[in-house]
Image (cartoon, helix red, strand yellow):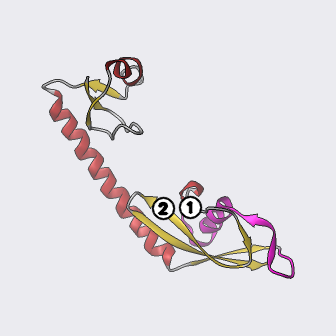
Amino acid sequence: MRVVLRSDVPNLGKRGDMCDVADGYARNFLFPKGQAIPANAGIANQAAKMRRARETKDAHDRQVAETVARKLVQQVIRIPMRAGPEGRLFGSVTTANIADAITEQAGLEVDRYRLRLPEPIKTLGTHEVPLRLHAEVEFPVTVEVIKA
C-alpha cells in the first residue's frame, strides 16, 4: 500500500515522504496513530507542501546549530572536580555535568543527549567532547577538568 507520512517514522521516512508499506502495517499501526494517510492522485500536492515545510524547518535548525557551534568552538568549558594526588577524580564528569557547565559558562541551553561521550571523564586535564546539534553539524567542545 502506498502512503504519505504525516510525521517522521523511524526506519521508514520523514514527513511528506511517499512510501510503500505492507497493508497491515498501514491499517494497524500508521493510520490509527495518525502518522500516515493513504496516497491517492490528489495527495501529491499535499506531500510536496509537507516536504517543503520540512526542508525550510531543517534549514533554519541547521543555521541555528551553526551559530551555536561558532560560539562554543572558541570557548573552553571549565569544570572543577575533586581529585586525588595522581589526577584521578573522585567520581566522574558526565554529559549532564558538561551540559550544566555549558549553560552556566556560555549561556546556551544544550541537551545532554546531544553530547557524544563514550565513557565518563575520570581524569584531570583537557578533553574533546563531540557535540551533535544537527544531522550535519557536529563539532568538538573543549572541556577542561580542573582540581577544585
Q: Is residue 22 magenta?
A: no
Reading the chain from its start, which is encountered first: label 2 or label 1? 1
Left or right: residue 121 compared with residue 11: right
- Label 2 with label 1: CB-CB less than 8 Å: yes
Q: Residue furthest left?
A: 41
The stretch in magenta equals 83-108
Disc 2 crowd, CA 10 A, few/some/many (<14, 14-19, 20+): some
Residue at 35 percent across and 63 percent down: it is: 63
Quarter of the N terminus within the rendering: top left
Quarter of the C terminus within the rendering: bottom right
- What amino acid type is highlighted by mark number 2? Arg
Left or right: residue 107 compared with residue 58: right
Q: Which residue is mark 1?
A: 116
Disc 1 crowd, CA 10 A, few/some/many (<14, 14-19, 20+): some
Q: Can you give x and y, in whole percent of width and height, for residue 101 in the image?
A: 65, 68
> Label 2 vs label 1: CA separation?
7 Å
For residue 91, above or below residue 9: below
For residue 69, above or below residue 86: above
> Helix or strand or loop: what does disc 2 sit on?
strand
Q: Which residue is mark 2?
A: 132
Q: Can you give x and y, in whole percent of width and height, for residue 7 in the image?
A: 36, 36
For residue 85, above or below residue 13: below
Residue at 83 percent across and 81 percent down: it is: 86
For residue 26, above or below residue 10: above
- What amino acid type is highlighted by mark number 1? Arg
Q: Can you give x and y, in whole percent of width and height, for residue 130 in the image?
A: 53, 67
Residue at 32 percent across and 19 percent down: it is: 23
